């Protein structure tokens, strides 16, 4: 919804800024802000933009802030504005004011790596620490000289956070400050990652498995094995706290540590899988119970037994989890806790929890064996519940409780089971009290579409003006295309039956032959009689005979993998020139004929479509996968093709290459079918996306992927060669597309 003229005038008055660079984008920025910010957030947004515009640093800080903040706030929350602007004010009061633009420019990509306010605050603290310690130490003059490395750090921060946790970043920065604070040029080289020392420290600090690097794989694991889906949100383990937080889930998603190191022979990725398996088991088999009448000790016992129950059910579902759970579970030694000095309840429960992993016949300790047998007997009933296991837990506590359990000093050694969550979901309370922490039931659920779509992939975008990549600039969402009526495609193929027969004759010529002769071989399976006779004549005539008198045979096979990438932008809904059909309808016919033809050849073929609605929402639809045959499911998706939005081509091409380059084929072809030049509503420089698409073609070429464009725009010559070089064909008569596309494919793959 576009703001009205009155609203824009009111907002301009609030902004009170006359930079012409801002005036040109103000309306679009405010439309974005209005859609993503609350009324109070909108007022704060304008107030802070006004401050940045009057700061005396030129138009760039205010311009970047106006463009970027709505997206950042939508990602991390409007409350983050206060600490961000506090950091800006601190920088502005120092000699480092010129670094503010770099700070704001990097903030969006940084937030995508650190998506919680606690993590963002940690990043701000590291940045201000760097500024203070490098500004004040140069030549021993306090806060006289600007930091040599602050702006460089902001420029490199996204790259650094791609390979390090927040704690690793802090350690890397601290090393640079301690070793190069008195050498400005060496300090610049260190933070620019151009020194060997800098790279060595970076390699050292890049330990463990970062959650943000594996969000997609873990999300697929959760969906495929547990039929569950939720946002995976990292929390920082970078700060010294009295007790590290544990995984948990709430209305906002599943919270996991931002990094896991390998431990006990279990990789960081498997530790994430274990934590997700435990949480998914709780979400499937646990039900919340009222906790008002339970003491903290009783709740601890119930949580221990319920954790063991859902772990046992998970291992029954997937036996391979046993190895991971057993390796990660502590194995406390009996007698390690002295009841004379400590409360040993946690220690006894950890011992019991470990014992519950194994069948009861393996235990000789009568103090544990009886409860293990009762636990497994309850599970054997098949319909155990959280309430049932709570009764068993209370019985255990009543019969094993010691007077020393009331001691204030609790024994914690070897009792932390870190793959398990904190069990806040198990408890409901009738009333809030001062000594009980209340956790609300989830009040919001994700939409059906959100649960069905995959997490976004973030791709860079080439900025030709600065000759650099904008990191993680584009968010691409992929999903399986909805289905329609497969019979519609059968009707289209019947309509082109005469063309199909013509194509069939051409296809027969392209089909692989079983055997092909290889002549002129020095070693071969049989004698090539013609060459042998010619060599004999040469020998008798006194000439040097040709020794290649043998021949062999080989199989003539095609080794080609093809991805057809369809532009599904709004312009496809227009009528084609010289036809009563729309461009979309003609594209459906052409794609159907092409898929049928490729099926006859047996080449691996994938078909996908894309369109975009700003850089934050590029949609990529799978119509046919490499492993799918030409059948009713694929036909139904093609029949349901719809066009809309814009054409952000570069990101779609990079994503298409992601699957194409994994195919085992000698030749890999990306065929792009489009009716116009790359464009999007948030891009006003028409060259920007053209240059980005050209850069994507170069990247694919380096990966061994041949890119070819079929363009349906009569005026495409003005831009298509800038993207694809000579690798394109312009089809002026769009009505002939169903005929031309399969023939062009056969020509390219002959």
Image (cartoon, rainbow, N blue to C red):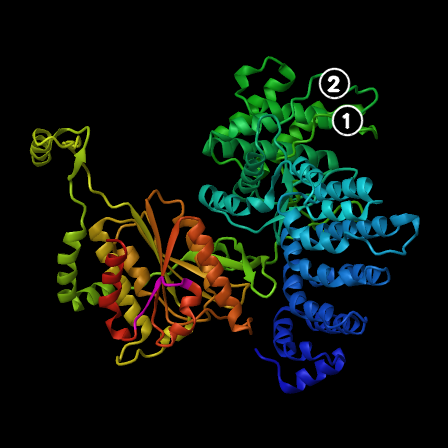
Residue to which mark 2 is pinned: 336
Residue 502, placed above or below residue 32: above
Residue 680 included in the magenta stretch of the image: no
Instruction: Please report the residue visible at 54 percent of the width from the left and 64 percent of the height from the top.
Output: 615
Which of the 4 image quadrants contains residue 357? top right
- The answer to whether the residue labelled 1 contacts the one labelled 2, judged by CB atoms less than 8 Å apart, is yes
Residue to which mark 1 is pinned: 411
Quadrant placement of the N terminus: bottom right
Which of the 4 image quadrants contains residue 289? top right
**What is the distance, in whole Å, between disc 1 and disc 2 at their CAs?**
9 Å
Q: Secondary structure at mark 1?
A: loop
Chain part drawn in magenta? 724-731
Q: Is residue 247 visible?
A: yes
- Rate crowding at label 2 as few (under 14), some (14 to 19) or many (20 or more) other CA atoms within 10 Å: few
Residue 278, placed above or below residue 144: above
Q: Which mark is residue 535?
A: none
Q: Pinpoint residue 88: horizontal percent, then vertical percent.
A: 79, 62
Residue 367, placed above or below residue 17: above
Q: Is residue 511 left or right of residue 20?
A: left
């Amino acid at each position: 919804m576009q703001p009205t003229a009155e609203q824009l005038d009111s907002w301009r008055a609030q902004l009170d800024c006359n930079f012409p660079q801002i005036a040109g984008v103000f309306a679009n920025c405010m439309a974005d802000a209005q859609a993503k910010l609350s009324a109070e957030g909108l007022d704060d947004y304008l107030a802070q933009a006004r401050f940045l515009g009057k700061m005396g640093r030129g138009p760039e800080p205010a311009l970047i802030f106006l463009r970027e903040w709505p997206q950042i706030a939508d990602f991390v929350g409007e409350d983050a504005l206060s600490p961000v602007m506090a950091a800006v004010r601190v920088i502005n009061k120092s000699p480092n004011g010129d670094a503010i633009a770099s700070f704001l420019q990097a903030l969006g990509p940084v937030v995508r790596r650190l998506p919680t306010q606690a993590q963002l605050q940690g990043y701000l603290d590291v940045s201000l620490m760097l500024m203070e310690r490098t500004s004040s130490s140069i030549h021993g003059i306090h806060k006289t000289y600007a930091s040599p490395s602050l702006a460089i750090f902001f420029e490199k921060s996204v790259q650094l956070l791609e390979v390090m946790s927040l704690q690793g970043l802090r350690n890397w920065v601290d090393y640079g400050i301690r070793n190069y604070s008195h050498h400005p040029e060496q300090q610049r080289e260190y933070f620019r990652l151009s020194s060997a020392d800098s790279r060595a420290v970076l390699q050292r600090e890049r330990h463990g498995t970062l959650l943000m690097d594996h969000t997609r794989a873990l999300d697929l694991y959760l969906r495929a094995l547990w039929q569950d889906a939720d946002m995976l949100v990292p929390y920082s383990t970078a700060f010294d706290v009295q007790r590290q937080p544990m995984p948990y889930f709430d209305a906002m998603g599943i919270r996991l540590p931002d990094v896991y190191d390998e431990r006990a022979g279990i990789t960081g990725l498997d530790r994430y899988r274990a934590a997700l398996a435990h949480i998914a088991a709780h979400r499937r088999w646990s039900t919340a119970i009222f906790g008002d009448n339970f003491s903290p000790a009783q709740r601890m016992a119930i949580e221990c037994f319920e954790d063991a129950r859902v772990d046992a059910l998970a291992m029954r579902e997937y036996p391979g989890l046993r190895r991971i759970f057993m390796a990660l579970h502590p194995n406390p030694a009996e007698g390690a806790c002295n009841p004379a000095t400590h409360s040993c309840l946690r220690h006894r429960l950890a011992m019991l929890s470990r014992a519950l992993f194994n069948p009861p016949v393996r235990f000789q300790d009568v103090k544990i064996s009886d409860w293990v047998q009762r636990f497994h007997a309850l599970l054997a009933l098949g319909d155990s519940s959280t309430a049932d296991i709570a009764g068993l837990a209370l019985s255990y506590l009543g019969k094993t409780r010691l007077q020393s359990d009331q001691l204030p000093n609790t024994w914690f050694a070897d009792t932390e089971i870190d793959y398990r969550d904190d069990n806040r979901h198990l408890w409901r309370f009738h009333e809030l009290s001062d000594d009980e922490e209340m956790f609300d039931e989830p009040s919001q659920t994700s939409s059906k579409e959100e649960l069905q779509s995959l997490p976004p992939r973030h791709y860079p975008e080439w900025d030709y003006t600065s000759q650099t990549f904008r990191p993680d600039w584009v968010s691409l969402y992929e999903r399986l295309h909805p289905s329609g009526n497969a019979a519609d495609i059968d009707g289209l193929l019947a309509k082109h039956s005469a063309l199909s027969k013509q194509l069939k004759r051409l296809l027969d010529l392209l089909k692989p032959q079983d055997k092909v002769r290889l002549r002129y071989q020095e070693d071969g399976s049989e004698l090539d009689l013609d060459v042998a006779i010619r060599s004999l004549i040469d020998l008798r005539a006194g000439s040097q005979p040709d020794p290649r008198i043998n021949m062999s045979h080989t199989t003539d096979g095609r080794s080609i993998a093809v991805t057809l990438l369809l532009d599904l932008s709004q312009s496809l809904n227009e009528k084609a020139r010289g036809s009563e059909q729309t461009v979309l309808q003609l594209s459906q016919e052409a794609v159907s004929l092409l898929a049928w033809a490729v099926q006859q050849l047996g080449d691996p073929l994938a078909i996908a479509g894309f369109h975009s609605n700003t850089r934050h929402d590029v949609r990529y639809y799978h119509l046919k996968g490499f492993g799918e045959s030409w059948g009713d499911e694929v036909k139904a998706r093609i029949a349901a093709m719809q066009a809309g939005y814009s054409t952000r081509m570069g990101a779609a091409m990079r994503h298409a290459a992601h699957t194409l380059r994994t195919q085992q084929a000698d030749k890999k072809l990306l065929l792009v079918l489009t009716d116009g030049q790359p464009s999007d509503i948030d891009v006003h420089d028409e060259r920007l996306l053209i240059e980005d698409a050209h850069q994507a073609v170069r990247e694919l070429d380096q990966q061994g992927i041949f890119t070819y464009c079929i363009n349906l725009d009569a005026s495409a010559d003005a831009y298509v060669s800038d993207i694809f070089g000579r690798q394109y064909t312009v089809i002026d008569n769009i009505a002939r597309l169903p005929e031309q596309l399969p023939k062009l494919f056969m020509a390219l793959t002959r």
